[in-house]
Image (cartoon, rainbow, N blue to C red):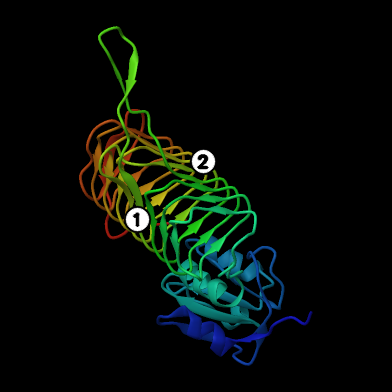
Amino acid sequence: MAKVKINIDELVSSIGGAFVLLGKRDRCVSAASPIDEADSDAVTFCNKKFPESLQMIRNTRAGVVICPDDLSFTEDDIRDRTLILVSDPRLAFMRIMRRHFANQGPTGCMSSAAVIDEAARIHPSVCIGPNSYIGACEIGDNSVIYGNAYIYSGTVIGKNVVIHAGVVIGSEGQGFHRNESGELEKFPQIGGVVIEDDVEIGSNTSINRGAMGNTVVGQGTKIGHLCSIAHGVTIGKHCIIASHSMLGGSSKIGDYCQVSLAGRIRNGARVGRNVLVGLGAIVTSDVGDNKIVYGVPAKEHGEIQGWIAMD
């Protein structure tokens, strides 16, 4: 198969923001590569700080490099390459990748090995992989559910949602209470789960239904692999919940938060808006807006100016 050739005008039109172009404009690329592996047919990016960034850009063999716009270059730095200077190289490169190089994923395919409840309401554009079970649910436009997922009845899934293999949504949480004899009696779990638009859920993650109300995952939130989201949790919009994280029952997380790898939120805890929970942190009490917390137990270590920076 012949390689697709993407010219400079197509690349910069994908960025969606201001840029400065240095060097050759009459060139094409056919691949997106890491900066230390790229060749002259590839586009890459550098997100490091000066002086490391300048050295990496000088050393790469990439034909096109997306660079920080606070760097200054000599003619020798540019040589026969094209440098595109932007305020956020990683974001610009992501947009180029998504438009020109990313696998767009399946749409509108229904595996014959999937089991789907007759009461399910599923948009025709939805893709459901083999050996998945779909209960009496609602699933919106262009959502993708990969194989071996189990979606219990009472789950509402929005548009453009991606649910990876092995995910379980809507199972019962540990709603138990000791009786007079010390035995465990079950608190009936009669709520549901609402997954809003543009959410992505990593493989083998479990999301319990609410005890009485709903467990809610807000629009645009991304949940990693092997996470546990307990009953009645509310996660705000555009959050990142990294792999191996655990959110206890009825905890609430505001919009634009990040729970880093293996973070833990105690049941009932409230985490504000635009909060960074550090690697392996255990949050045992409420956290206000714009805070950075880490440690065991987690403590405040400053405030976030602007948005949480992503690597």
The amino acid on which the numbered mark 2 sits, given as a three-letter code, is Leu
Q: Residue at horizontal 25%, vertical 36%?
A: 269
Of 217 and 170, the residue lying toward us: 170
Q: Which mark is residue 292?
A: none
Front-most of residues 200 and 136? 136
- Of residues 104 and 153, the one nearer the viewer is 153
Mark 1 highlights which residue? 308
Circle 1 Cα neighbour tier, 10 Å, few/some/many (<14 / 14–19 / ≥20): some
Name of the residue lying farthest toward the right: 1
Measuring from the top left, give residue 178's x and y in whole percent.
Answer: 29, 15
Numbered disc in front, either 2 or 1: 2
User: Which type of secondary structure does the marked residue at label 1 adopt?
Assistant: loop
Q: Which residue does the image show at 38% across and 33% down from the upper left?
A: 173
Which label belongs to residue 226?
Answer: 2
Tag 2–tag 1 contact (CB < 8 Å) = no
Give the image quarter of residue 141: bottom left
Q: Residue at x 22, y 37 (%)?
A: 286
Amino acid bearing label 1: Ile
Which image quarter is the N terminus in?
bottom right
Q: Which quarter of the figure has residue 170?
A: top left
Kind of element beneath mark 2? loop
Q: Position of residue 79 (x, y in %)?
A: 65, 82
CA–CA distance between discs 2 and 1?
Answer: 23 Å
Query: Picture coordinates of residue 256 (x, y %)?
Result: 31, 56
Relative to residue 275, is residue 296 depicted above or below?
A: above
Q: Position of residue 19 (x, y in %)?
A: 44, 82
Left or right: residue 177 versus residue 114 is left
Q: For this view, does 117 lie left or right of residue 5?
A: left
* Horizontal arrangement in the rendering, residue 3 relative to residue 287 (left or right): right
